[in-house]
Amino acid sequence: MPTLVRPFRALRPVPPRAGDVIAPPYDVVSADEALALAAGRPASFLHISRPEIDLPPGASPYSDEAYARGAANLARLVDAGTLVRDAEPSYYVYRIEMQERVQTGVALVASVAAYEANRIRRHELTRPEKEDDRVRNIDSLNAQTGPVLLAYRANAALGALVREAAGSHPLLSARGPNDTLHTIWRVAEPERAAALTTAFDALDALYIADGHHRSAAALRVARARRDRPRAGASAPARAAPRSGDLSHEYFLAVAFPHDEMRILDYNRVVRDLDGLAPDALLARLRETFDVEPSAGPVKPSQPETFGLFVAGRWHRLRIRPALVPRGDPVASLDVSLLQDHVLAPVLGIRDPRTDTRIDFVGGVRGLDELERRVTSGRDAAAFAMHPTRMEQLMAVADAGRLMPLKSTWFEPKLADGLLSHVLD
């Protein structure tokens, strides 16, 4: 029976080149931002994760040429000795420091079978076109290069093993985007690795925090490769059931204890007020909220409270407690309360997945960005949210439910390029 997680032979930068290779995740930067970040940095992993930056302007990131260029760029870094592969399977303790926050997890490969069985639990829908992109990315590189962000309920046994490993000399360290420091320790000793495997196997579940498309793509790749004949094998061997220990039956991830992870607010801006004047909007909101003008920006400090910036002024909104469906882990989320009591009935935004009148602003950009977008005339109003809590995310996943669109913004982000999983 395959284990929940296992160690792997990471493809990684040699320590002196880690700062040259490290890059933000492929999906948090635009092509223009990637081009600027990679300028003068030929070893930047953006040449692999966003290879269209090396093609003529306007080239599609989904073209055959883009995937081929990414594979060629990866091979170039391996051939140059910038990236090397560890000889023995290992776990990698992974610490991220951002300002005064520190979170320490374990880089590993997680079982596709456990994902299929919902022991690795998801909370978001995926979009087929984004899954298709990640499948082609994995197949063209024959590697998983962007780790999935996982969470587990804080656990004393795992915590002790992680602290012990992080007490030794690190394998590598590099500064990443947003002034983050990424430090990695290798855990190769068989006894320590076995102890980590056992501790993870004792968990009831792991939770996907960020990386639903990458994990779904890993499942699709695994299913396709299960049925692929193995080169050089005899006919009976080619027909035999596939082993759950093959590398494509696991996907690259970093797992952190839930109480060290930070979810930022994921705020909303709307293009127009659906024909309402600002005073009329406030009047409608008073039917379900306590509305209080504020002399300054409103950053909600507790659930069921929202900030509203409209017509050059901030307001604090508190939904009436009787309207909160406390027995429902999805409907009671702040993002659901805003959707169900403001966006749909008042502003006519019934499907935020498809309605072009709404946009989403990650909390890392701050409330100033909300003010800027409204005062510039780009948007008519902005809603500042209280962050979703990790306990809420896990409750939704445990119930087999899905979170609403754009419910979580995790910060800090994992880096691309420091650890990759080669599919043997």
Image: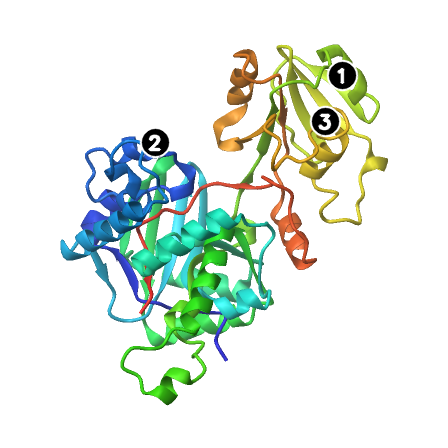
On the image, the x and y values in percent for residue 39 come to: 23, 33
352 and 196: which one is in front?
A: 352
Task: Please determine whether, in this image, residue 256 is positioned above or below residue 295.
Answer: below
Task: Please determine whether, in this image, residue 315 is positioned above or below residue 182.
Answer: above
Cα distance, mark 2 to mark 3?
Answer: 33 Å
On the image, the x and y values in percent for residue 190 come to: 34, 76
Find residue 232 and report its image quarter.
Answer: bottom left
267 and 321: which one is in front?
A: 267
The circle drawn on residue 33 is: 2
For badge 1, the amino acid type reads Leu
Which residue was labeled with disc 1?
282
For badge 2, the amino acid type reads Glu
What is the secondary structure assignment of the residue under circle 1? Answer: helix
What is the secondary structure assignment of the residue under circle 3? Answer: loop
Which residue was labeled with disc 3?
348
On the image, the x and y values in percent for residue 279 come to: 75, 11
Cα distance, mark 1 to mark 3?
Answer: 15 Å
Q: Earlier in the sequence, mark 2 or mark 3?
A: 2
Q: Residue at x 55, y 12 (%)?
A: 377
Q: Is residue 281 left or right of residue 388?
A: right
User: Can the viewer see residue 357?
Assistant: yes
For badge 3, the amino acid type reads Gly
Q: Earlier in the sequence, mark 1 or mark 3?
A: 1
On the image, the x and y values in percent for residue 83 come to: 21, 55
